[in-house]
Image (cartoon, rainbow, N blue to C red):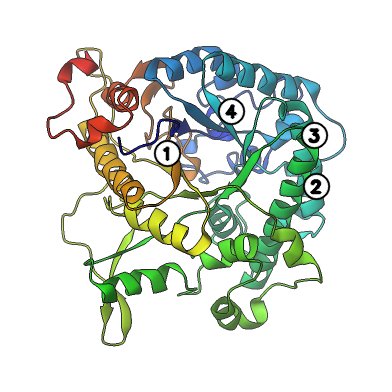
Protein backbone atom coordinates (compact mmCIF):
# COMPACT_ATOMS: atom_id res chain seq x y z
CA UNK A 1 0.00 0.00 0.00
CA UNK A 2 1.47 3.34 -1.07
CA UNK A 3 -0.61 5.56 1.19
CA UNK A 4 -0.34 4.98 4.95
CA UNK A 5 -3.32 3.63 6.84
CA UNK A 6 -3.71 6.86 8.80
CA UNK A 7 -3.54 9.07 5.69
CA UNK A 8 -5.92 12.05 5.94
CA UNK A 9 -8.16 11.59 2.91
CA UNK A 10 -10.10 14.82 3.01
CA UNK A 11 -11.81 17.74 1.35
CA UNK A 12 -11.81 21.44 2.14
CA UNK A 13 -13.95 24.57 2.19
CA UNK A 14 -13.90 28.07 3.64
CA UNK A 15 -16.51 29.80 5.74
CA UNK A 16 -17.48 32.68 3.46
CA UNK A 17 -17.70 30.42 0.44
CA UNK A 18 -20.29 28.04 1.91
CA UNK A 19 -21.87 29.27 5.14
CA UNK A 20 -24.20 32.06 4.05
CA UNK A 21 -26.22 33.50 6.95
CA UNK A 22 -24.03 36.58 6.83
CA UNK A 23 -26.23 38.57 9.22
CA UNK A 24 -27.54 35.69 11.33
CA UNK A 25 -27.22 35.40 15.09
CA UNK A 26 -24.83 38.25 15.71
CA UNK A 27 -22.31 37.81 12.88
CA UNK A 28 -20.63 41.05 11.86
CA UNK A 29 -19.80 42.06 8.29
CA UNK A 30 -16.57 41.00 6.63
CA UNK A 31 -14.63 42.76 3.90
CA UNK A 32 -16.21 40.32 1.44
CA UNK A 33 -19.74 41.29 2.45
CA UNK A 34 -18.91 44.90 1.67
CA UNK A 35 -16.97 44.11 -1.51
CA UNK A 36 -19.80 42.04 -2.97
CA UNK A 37 -22.10 45.06 -2.79
CA UNK A 38 -19.78 47.03 -5.08
CA UNK A 39 -21.24 47.12 -8.61
CA UNK A 40 -19.21 44.98 -11.00
CA UNK A 41 -16.92 43.59 -8.31
CA UNK A 42 -18.15 39.99 -8.58
CA UNK A 43 -19.23 38.14 -11.70
CA UNK A 44 -22.98 38.22 -12.16
CA UNK A 45 -23.43 40.47 -9.13
CA UNK A 46 -23.19 37.38 -6.94
CA UNK A 47 -22.49 37.44 -3.21
CA UNK A 48 -21.96 35.03 -0.35
CA UNK A 49 -25.13 36.04 1.48
CA UNK A 50 -26.61 32.55 1.13
CA UNK A 51 -23.86 30.58 -0.63
CA UNK A 52 -24.50 26.88 0.19
CA UNK A 53 -26.57 27.75 3.28
CA UNK A 54 -24.17 25.51 5.18
CA UNK A 55 -24.82 27.43 8.40
CA UNK A 56 -28.30 25.89 8.46
CA UNK A 57 -27.59 22.71 6.53
CA UNK A 58 -24.30 21.64 8.13
CA UNK A 59 -25.71 18.38 9.54
CA UNK A 60 -26.85 17.21 6.10
CA UNK A 61 -23.51 18.27 4.62
CA UNK A 62 -21.60 16.28 7.23
CA UNK A 63 -23.78 13.29 6.35
CA UNK A 64 -22.68 13.68 2.72
CA UNK A 65 -19.04 13.77 3.82
CA UNK A 66 -19.61 10.56 5.73
CA UNK A 67 -21.29 8.99 2.71
CA UNK A 68 -18.22 9.82 0.61
CA UNK A 69 -16.02 8.32 3.32
CA UNK A 70 -13.96 11.38 4.13
CA UNK A 71 -11.53 10.89 6.98
CA UNK A 72 -10.73 14.57 7.37
CA UNK A 73 -12.40 17.89 6.62
CA UNK A 74 -10.66 21.23 6.40
CA UNK A 75 -12.97 24.09 7.34
CA UNK A 76 -12.40 27.69 8.26
CA UNK A 77 -13.82 29.79 11.07
CA UNK A 78 -15.49 33.07 10.13
CA UNK A 79 -13.67 35.66 12.23
CA UNK A 80 -16.64 38.12 12.16
CA UNK A 81 -19.00 35.37 13.26
CA UNK A 82 -16.97 34.89 16.42
CA UNK A 83 -15.92 38.50 17.01
CA UNK A 84 -18.30 40.79 15.11
CA UNK A 85 -15.98 43.76 15.60
CA UNK A 86 -12.82 41.73 15.17
CA UNK A 87 -11.83 42.15 18.81
CA UNK A 88 -13.66 42.68 22.09
CA UNK A 89 -17.13 41.25 22.58
CA UNK A 90 -17.45 37.57 21.71
CA UNK A 91 -20.51 36.33 19.83
CA UNK A 92 -21.30 33.14 21.71
CA UNK A 93 -23.94 32.09 19.18
CA UNK A 94 -21.25 32.08 16.51
CA UNK A 95 -19.03 29.86 18.62
CA UNK A 96 -22.00 27.62 19.32
CA UNK A 97 -22.33 26.96 15.59
CA UNK A 98 -18.74 25.76 15.36
CA UNK A 99 -19.26 23.66 18.48
CA UNK A 100 -22.13 21.88 16.77
CA UNK A 101 -20.21 21.48 13.51
CA UNK A 102 -17.11 20.04 15.21
CA UNK A 103 -19.22 17.62 17.24
CA UNK A 104 -21.08 16.49 14.13
CA UNK A 105 -17.80 15.81 12.33
CA UNK A 106 -16.38 13.84 15.22
CA UNK A 107 -19.59 11.84 15.56
CA UNK A 108 -19.22 10.96 11.85
CA UNK A 109 -15.63 9.82 12.36
CA UNK A 110 -14.22 12.78 10.43
CA UNK A 111 -11.19 14.63 11.82
CA UNK A 112 -11.60 18.43 11.70
CA UNK A 113 -8.71 20.52 10.41
CA UNK A 114 -9.51 24.12 11.29
CA UNK A 115 -8.22 27.14 9.38
CA UNK A 116 -8.39 30.33 11.40
CA UNK A 117 -8.23 32.84 8.56
CA UNK A 118 -9.49 32.28 5.02
CA UNK A 119 -9.79 35.89 3.82
CA UNK A 120 -12.92 37.11 5.67
CA UNK A 121 -11.36 39.94 7.69
CA UNK A 122 -13.95 41.72 9.86
CA UNK A 123 -14.91 44.98 8.17
CA UNK A 124 -14.56 46.78 11.50
CA UNK A 125 -10.85 45.93 11.55
CA UNK A 126 -10.37 46.95 7.92
CA UNK A 127 -11.75 50.33 8.87
CA UNK A 128 -9.15 50.54 11.64
CA UNK A 129 -6.33 50.00 9.16
CA UNK A 130 -6.56 46.26 8.59
CA UNK A 131 -3.34 44.37 7.98
CA UNK A 132 -1.45 47.62 7.46
CA UNK A 133 -1.77 48.30 11.18
CA UNK A 134 0.87 46.43 13.17
CA UNK A 135 -1.77 45.80 15.82
CA UNK A 136 -3.43 43.36 13.38
CA UNK A 137 -1.08 40.65 14.64
CA UNK A 138 -2.45 41.12 18.16
CA UNK A 139 -6.01 41.25 16.90
CA UNK A 140 -5.49 37.88 15.24
CA UNK A 141 -3.89 36.43 18.36
CA UNK A 142 -6.89 37.55 20.44
CA UNK A 143 -9.27 35.93 17.97
CA UNK A 144 -7.18 32.74 17.94
CA UNK A 145 -7.32 32.53 21.72
CA UNK A 146 -11.11 32.89 21.75
CA UNK A 147 -11.54 30.09 19.20
CA UNK A 148 -8.96 27.77 20.76
CA UNK A 149 -10.40 28.11 24.25
CA UNK A 150 -13.72 26.88 22.92
CA UNK A 151 -12.61 24.22 20.41
CA UNK A 152 -9.13 23.00 21.31
CA UNK A 153 -10.50 20.26 23.54
CA UNK A 154 -11.70 18.56 20.32
CA UNK A 155 -9.71 20.17 17.51
CA UNK A 156 -6.08 19.12 17.40
CA UNK A 157 -5.16 20.08 13.80
CA UNK A 158 -4.90 23.76 12.90
CA UNK A 159 -3.99 25.94 9.96
CA UNK A 160 -3.35 29.56 10.88
CA UNK A 161 -3.64 31.53 7.63
CA UNK A 162 -4.63 30.59 4.09
CA UNK A 163 -2.80 31.85 1.01
CA UNK A 164 -1.33 35.22 2.00
CA UNK A 165 -0.03 35.61 -1.55
CA UNK A 166 -3.59 35.66 -2.90
CA UNK A 167 -5.53 37.78 -0.44
CA UNK A 168 -2.77 40.41 -0.25
CA UNK A 169 -2.03 40.58 -3.98
CA UNK A 170 -5.63 40.41 -5.18
CA UNK A 171 -7.17 42.32 -2.30
CA UNK A 172 -4.66 45.14 -1.83
CA UNK A 173 -2.54 45.31 -4.98
CA UNK A 174 -4.74 44.58 -8.00
CA UNK A 175 -8.05 45.18 -6.22
CA UNK A 176 -9.89 42.27 -7.83
CA UNK A 177 -10.70 40.72 -4.43
CA UNK A 178 -11.95 42.22 -1.18
CA UNK A 179 -11.44 44.86 0.01
CA UNK A 180 -10.67 46.00 -3.56
CA UNK A 181 -7.74 48.32 -2.88
CA UNK A 182 -4.72 49.21 -5.01
CA UNK A 183 -1.92 50.11 -2.64
CA UNK A 184 1.79 50.71 -3.27
CA UNK A 185 3.93 47.58 -3.10
CA UNK A 186 5.71 48.89 -0.01
CA UNK A 187 2.43 49.00 1.87
CA UNK A 188 1.43 45.53 0.69
CA UNK A 189 4.79 44.05 1.75
CA UNK A 190 4.42 45.70 5.15
CA UNK A 191 0.97 44.13 5.42
CA UNK A 192 2.52 40.81 4.50
CA UNK A 193 4.99 41.14 7.35
CA UNK A 194 2.13 41.81 9.75
CA UNK A 195 0.31 38.73 8.39
CA UNK A 196 3.39 36.60 9.11
CA UNK A 197 3.67 38.17 12.55
CA UNK A 198 0.00 37.31 13.09
CA UNK A 199 0.76 33.73 12.09
CA UNK A 200 3.52 33.49 14.70
CA UNK A 201 1.40 34.99 17.45
CA UNK A 202 -1.46 32.70 16.49
CA UNK A 203 0.78 29.65 16.86
CA UNK A 204 1.78 30.88 20.32
CA UNK A 205 -1.87 31.41 21.23
CA UNK A 206 -2.86 27.94 20.02
CA UNK A 207 -0.11 26.29 22.03
CA UNK A 208 -1.08 28.27 25.14
CA UNK A 209 -4.80 27.49 24.85
CA UNK A 210 -4.45 23.78 24.02
CA UNK A 211 -4.36 21.58 27.10
CA UNK A 212 -3.28 18.56 25.09
CA UNK A 213 -1.05 18.06 22.06
CA UNK A 214 -1.93 19.83 18.85
CA UNK A 215 -0.53 19.98 15.33
CA UNK A 216 -0.17 23.36 13.65
CA UNK A 217 0.77 24.47 10.16
CA UNK A 218 -0.24 27.09 7.66
CA UNK A 219 -1.39 26.99 4.05
CA UNK A 220 0.38 29.29 1.61
CA UNK A 221 0.08 28.92 -2.13
CA UNK A 222 2.56 26.29 -3.26
CA UNK A 223 4.02 27.87 -6.40
CA UNK A 224 5.40 24.77 -8.08
CA UNK A 225 7.87 24.44 -10.94
CA UNK A 226 8.18 21.04 -12.60
CA UNK A 227 11.36 19.96 -14.44
CA UNK A 228 10.92 19.29 -18.13
CA UNK A 229 12.97 16.10 -17.69
CA UNK A 230 14.29 14.13 -14.74
CA UNK A 231 17.82 15.16 -15.66
CA UNK A 232 19.85 16.84 -12.90
CA UNK A 233 20.05 20.16 -14.73
CA UNK A 234 16.29 20.48 -15.20
CA UNK A 235 15.61 19.37 -11.63
CA UNK A 236 18.00 22.05 -10.44
CA UNK A 237 16.16 24.59 -12.63
CA UNK A 238 12.88 23.68 -10.93
CA UNK A 239 14.51 23.89 -7.52
CA UNK A 240 15.97 27.33 -8.27
CA UNK A 241 12.66 28.69 -9.49
CA UNK A 242 10.71 27.28 -6.56
CA UNK A 243 13.04 28.76 -4.00
CA UNK A 244 13.81 32.17 -5.42
CA UNK A 245 12.00 35.49 -5.54
CA UNK A 246 12.07 35.41 -9.32
CA UNK A 247 9.82 38.35 -10.22
CA UNK A 248 8.22 41.46 -8.70
CA UNK A 249 4.91 39.80 -7.82
CA UNK A 250 3.97 38.30 -4.48
CA UNK A 251 3.59 34.84 -6.00
CA UNK A 252 6.68 33.06 -4.82
CA UNK A 253 7.39 30.59 -2.05
CA UNK A 254 10.36 31.73 -0.02
CA UNK A 255 9.17 35.23 0.92
CA UNK A 256 6.23 33.64 2.72
CA UNK A 257 7.69 30.31 3.81
CA UNK A 258 11.26 31.07 4.86
CA UNK A 259 10.39 33.45 7.74
CA UNK A 260 8.02 30.98 9.50
CA UNK A 261 10.09 27.90 8.69
CA UNK A 262 13.69 29.15 8.59
CA UNK A 263 13.48 32.37 10.61
CA UNK A 264 14.64 34.76 7.89
CA UNK A 265 13.54 36.60 4.79
CA UNK A 266 15.30 35.41 1.61
CA UNK A 267 18.21 37.63 0.64
CA UNK A 268 17.26 37.67 -3.04
CA UNK A 269 13.80 38.96 -2.07
CA UNK A 270 15.23 41.77 0.02
CA UNK A 271 17.49 42.72 -2.89
CA UNK A 272 14.63 42.65 -5.38
CA UNK A 273 12.15 44.56 -3.25
CA UNK A 274 14.78 46.99 -2.01
CA UNK A 275 13.31 50.05 -0.34
CA UNK A 276 9.85 48.44 -0.50
CA UNK A 277 10.94 45.71 1.93
CA UNK A 278 9.01 45.82 5.21
CA UNK A 279 10.08 47.37 8.46
CA UNK A 280 11.12 44.45 10.66
CA UNK A 281 11.40 45.26 14.33
CA UNK A 282 13.70 43.45 16.78
CA UNK A 283 12.16 40.15 17.82
CA UNK A 284 9.72 39.95 14.89
CA UNK A 285 11.43 37.08 13.12
CA UNK A 286 11.74 35.14 16.37
CA UNK A 287 7.97 35.53 16.85
CA UNK A 288 7.23 34.53 13.26
CA UNK A 289 9.57 31.52 13.46
CA UNK A 290 7.47 29.32 15.74
CA UNK A 291 7.90 25.54 15.66
CA UNK A 292 5.40 23.98 13.26
CA UNK A 293 4.23 20.39 13.00
CA UNK A 294 3.44 20.16 9.29
CA UNK A 295 3.76 22.09 6.08
CA UNK A 296 0.54 22.76 4.20
CA UNK A 297 0.42 24.04 0.66
CA UNK A 298 -2.32 24.68 -1.88
CA UNK A 299 -1.35 23.49 -5.36
CA UNK A 300 -3.51 23.23 -8.47
CA UNK A 301 -1.13 23.58 -11.38
CA UNK A 302 2.56 24.22 -12.14
CA UNK A 303 4.95 25.73 -14.63
CA UNK A 304 7.33 23.43 -16.53
CA UNK A 305 10.94 24.64 -16.59
CA UNK A 306 14.28 23.55 -18.01
CA UNK A 307 17.86 24.68 -17.58
CA UNK A 308 18.81 26.92 -20.48
CA UNK A 309 22.10 28.51 -21.43
CA UNK A 310 21.33 31.55 -19.28
CA UNK A 311 19.73 29.66 -16.40
CA UNK A 312 16.20 28.34 -15.72
CA UNK A 313 13.64 29.05 -18.42
CA UNK A 314 9.95 28.29 -18.67
CA UNK A 315 8.70 25.79 -21.23
CA UNK A 316 5.63 27.15 -23.07
CA UNK A 317 2.44 25.13 -22.77
CA UNK A 318 1.47 23.21 -25.87
CA UNK A 319 -1.40 24.70 -27.89
CA UNK A 320 -4.66 23.05 -26.94
CA UNK A 321 -3.26 21.55 -23.77
CA UNK A 322 -5.58 20.26 -21.05
CA UNK A 323 -6.92 22.87 -18.65
CA UNK A 324 -9.84 23.43 -16.32
CA UNK A 325 -12.67 25.87 -16.94
CA UNK A 326 -10.69 28.31 -14.77
CA UNK A 327 -7.98 28.01 -17.46
CA UNK A 328 -5.50 26.39 -15.08
CA UNK A 329 -3.31 23.90 -16.91
CA UNK A 330 -3.29 20.22 -16.02
CA UNK A 331 0.15 19.41 -14.57
CA UNK A 332 -0.16 16.31 -12.35
CA UNK A 333 3.60 16.33 -11.68
CA UNK A 334 2.92 19.32 -9.43
CA UNK A 335 1.96 16.87 -6.67
CA UNK A 336 5.22 15.01 -7.06
CA UNK A 337 7.75 17.82 -7.36
CA UNK A 338 5.95 20.25 -5.06
CA UNK A 339 5.87 17.95 -2.01
CA UNK A 340 9.30 16.52 -2.82
CA UNK A 341 11.07 19.87 -3.05
CA UNK A 342 9.19 21.46 -0.15
CA UNK A 343 10.06 18.44 2.00
CA UNK A 344 13.67 18.65 0.89
CA UNK A 345 13.93 22.32 1.89
CA UNK A 346 11.80 22.50 5.03
CA UNK A 347 11.84 18.95 6.40
CA UNK A 348 8.27 18.98 7.71
CA UNK A 349 5.50 16.46 7.02
CA UNK A 350 3.38 17.58 4.07
CA UNK A 351 -0.34 18.20 3.78
CA UNK A 352 -1.73 19.06 0.37
CA UNK A 353 -4.20 21.53 1.83
CA UNK A 354 -6.00 22.24 -1.45
CA UNK A 355 -6.02 20.62 -4.88
CA UNK A 356 -8.85 20.40 -7.37
CA UNK A 357 -10.37 21.67 -10.57
CA UNK A 358 -13.32 23.67 -11.81
CA UNK A 359 -15.50 21.93 -14.37
CA UNK A 360 -18.71 22.48 -16.32
CA UNK A 361 -20.99 20.32 -14.17
CA UNK A 362 -24.76 20.03 -14.29
CA UNK A 363 -27.42 17.50 -13.37
CA UNK A 364 -27.97 15.28 -16.41
CA UNK A 365 -31.25 13.89 -17.67
CA UNK A 366 -30.60 10.73 -15.67
CA UNK A 367 -30.48 12.78 -12.46
CA UNK A 368 -26.73 12.30 -12.00
CA UNK A 369 -23.74 14.60 -12.37
CA UNK A 370 -21.12 13.12 -14.69
CA UNK A 371 -17.69 14.74 -14.29
CA UNK A 372 -15.14 12.40 -15.88
CA UNK A 373 -12.61 15.20 -16.26
CA UNK A 374 -12.49 15.69 -12.50
CA UNK A 375 -12.03 11.96 -11.90
CA UNK A 376 -9.18 11.92 -14.41
CA UNK A 377 -7.64 15.03 -12.83
CA UNK A 378 -7.75 13.56 -9.33
CA UNK A 379 -6.42 10.20 -10.46
CA UNK A 380 -3.46 11.77 -12.25
CA UNK A 381 -2.58 14.11 -9.37
CA UNK A 382 -3.03 11.51 -6.65
CA UNK A 383 -0.89 9.01 -8.53
CA UNK A 384 1.92 11.55 -8.56
CA UNK A 385 1.39 12.23 -4.85
CA UNK A 386 1.65 8.48 -4.29
CA UNK A 387 4.94 8.45 -6.19
CA UNK A 388 6.24 11.18 -3.88
CA UNK A 389 5.31 9.00 -0.91
CA UNK A 390 7.08 6.01 -2.40
CA UNK A 391 10.18 8.15 -2.92
CA UNK A 392 10.35 9.00 0.76
CA UNK A 393 8.34 12.21 1.07
CA UNK A 394 6.41 12.30 4.35
CA UNK A 395 2.95 13.16 3.02
CA UNK A 396 0.25 13.00 5.68
CA UNK A 397 -2.91 14.22 3.93
CA UNK A 398 -4.73 15.36 0.82
CA UNK A 399 -7.68 17.78 0.86
CA UNK A 400 -9.66 18.02 -2.37
CA UNK A 401 -11.01 21.49 -3.08
CA UNK A 402 -13.90 21.50 -2.58
CA UNK A 403 -16.49 19.25 -0.99
CA UNK A 404 -19.29 21.51 -2.34
CA UNK A 405 -19.71 23.78 -5.31
CA UNK A 406 -19.53 27.19 -3.69
CA UNK A 407 -18.99 30.94 -3.97
CA UNK A 408 -15.74 31.25 -5.90
CA UNK A 409 -14.77 34.77 -4.81
CA UNK A 410 -14.72 37.25 -7.70
CA UNK A 411 -16.01 34.53 -10.03
CA UNK A 412 -19.23 34.20 -8.04
CA UNK A 413 -21.03 30.92 -8.67
CA UNK A 414 -19.65 30.50 -12.19
CA UNK A 415 -16.89 28.04 -11.28
CA UNK A 416 -17.80 24.61 -9.87
CA UNK A 417 -15.04 22.85 -7.93
CA UNK A 418 -17.16 20.54 -5.79
CA UNK A 419 -17.45 16.81 -5.37
CA UNK A 420 -21.07 17.62 -4.61
CA UNK A 421 -23.20 19.63 -7.03
CA UNK A 422 -25.21 22.45 -5.46
CA UNK A 423 -28.30 23.90 -7.12
CA UNK A 424 -28.04 27.40 -5.69
CA UNK A 425 -31.70 28.14 -6.42
CA UNK A 426 -33.02 25.20 -4.40
CA UNK A 427 -29.93 24.20 -2.34
CA UNK A 428 -30.38 20.62 -3.59
CA UNK A 429 -27.19 18.58 -3.25
CA UNK A 430 -26.24 15.87 -5.77
CA UNK A 431 -23.15 13.72 -5.38
CA UNK A 432 -21.12 13.81 -8.58
CA UNK A 433 -19.52 10.76 -10.12
CA UNK A 434 -16.22 12.03 -8.71
CA UNK A 435 -17.61 11.77 -5.17
CA UNK A 436 -18.40 8.08 -5.65
CA UNK A 437 -15.01 7.54 -7.29
CA UNK A 438 -13.24 9.25 -4.40
CA UNK A 439 -15.16 7.01 -1.98
CA UNK A 440 -13.78 4.02 -3.87
CA UNK A 441 -10.24 5.37 -3.65
CA UNK A 442 -10.50 6.13 0.07
CA UNK A 443 -12.03 2.74 0.88
CA UNK A 444 -9.08 1.02 -0.79
CA UNK A 445 -6.45 3.18 0.86
CA UNK A 446 -5.46 4.63 -2.50
CA UNK A 447 -4.70 1.29 -4.11
CA UNK A 448 -7.40 1.88 -6.74
CA UNK A 449 -5.27 4.69 -8.16
CA UNK A 450 -2.66 2.20 -9.30
CA UNK A 451 -5.06 -0.44 -10.62
CA UNK A 452 -4.66 -0.44 -14.41
CA UNK A 453 -8.37 -1.16 -14.77
CA UNK A 454 -10.76 1.82 -14.73
CA UNK A 455 -12.85 2.43 -11.65
CA UNK A 456 -16.09 0.40 -11.82
CA UNK A 457 -18.78 2.40 -13.54
CA UNK A 458 -21.33 0.95 -11.12
CA UNK A 459 -19.89 3.13 -8.35
CA UNK A 460 -21.61 6.13 -9.87
CA UNK A 461 -25.00 4.42 -10.17
Viewer-nearest residue: 78 or 451: 451
Give me the C-alpha separation between circle 4 and circle 1: 29 Å
Viewer-nearest residue: 153 or 169: 153
For marks 4 and 1 on the same chain, the one whose residue lies earlier in the sequence: 4
For marks 4 and 2 on the same chain, the one whose residue lies earlier in the sequence: 4
Give me the C-alpha separation between circle 3 and circle 2: 11 Å
Give the number of the mark in front: 2 or 1.
1
Residue 277, how many percent across, how many down? 66, 75
Q: Residue at x 49, y 37 (%)?
A: 45
Residue 427 appears in the rendering: no
Q: Residue at x 73, y 19 (%)?
A: 96
Which class describes the residues within 10 Å of circle 1: few (<14), some (14-19), or many (20+)?
A: many
Residue denoted by label 4: 49
Which class describes the residues within 10 Å of circle 2: few (<14), some (14-19), or many (20+)?
A: some
Helix, strand or loop at label 4? It is: loop
Residue denoted by label 1: 398
Q: Quadrant of residue 429?
A: top left
The tag on residue 337 is none
Helix, strand or loop at label 2? It is: helix
Give me the C-alpha separation between circle 4 and circle 3: 25 Å
**In this rendering, position of residue 95 left or right of residue 274:** right
Residue denoted by label 2: 139
For marks 2 and 1 on the same chain, the one whose residue lies earlier in the sequence: 2
Residue 222 appears in the rendering: yes
- For the residues labelled 4 and 1, say whether their Cβ atoms are less than 8 Å apart: no
Give me the C-alpha separation between circle 4 and circle 2: 25 Å
In the picture as drawn, the residue positioned furthest to the bottom comes out as 310
Helix, strand or loop at label 3? It is: helix
**In this rendering, position of residue 47 left or right of residue 452:** right
Residue denoted by label 3: 146
Amino acid sequence: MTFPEDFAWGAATSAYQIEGAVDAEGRGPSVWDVFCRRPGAVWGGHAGDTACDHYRRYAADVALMRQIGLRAYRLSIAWPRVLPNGVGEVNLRGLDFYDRLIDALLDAGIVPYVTLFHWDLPQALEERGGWLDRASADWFAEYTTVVARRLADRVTHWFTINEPQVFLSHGYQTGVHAPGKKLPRKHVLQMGHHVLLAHGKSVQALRAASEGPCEIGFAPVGTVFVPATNGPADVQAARQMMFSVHDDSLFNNTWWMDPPLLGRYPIDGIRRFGADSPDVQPGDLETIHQPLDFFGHNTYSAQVVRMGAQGPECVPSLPGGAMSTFRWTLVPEALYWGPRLFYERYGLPIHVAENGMSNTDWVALDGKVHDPQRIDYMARYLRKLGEALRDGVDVRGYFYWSILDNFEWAEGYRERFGLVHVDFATQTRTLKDSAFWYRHVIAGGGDALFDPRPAPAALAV
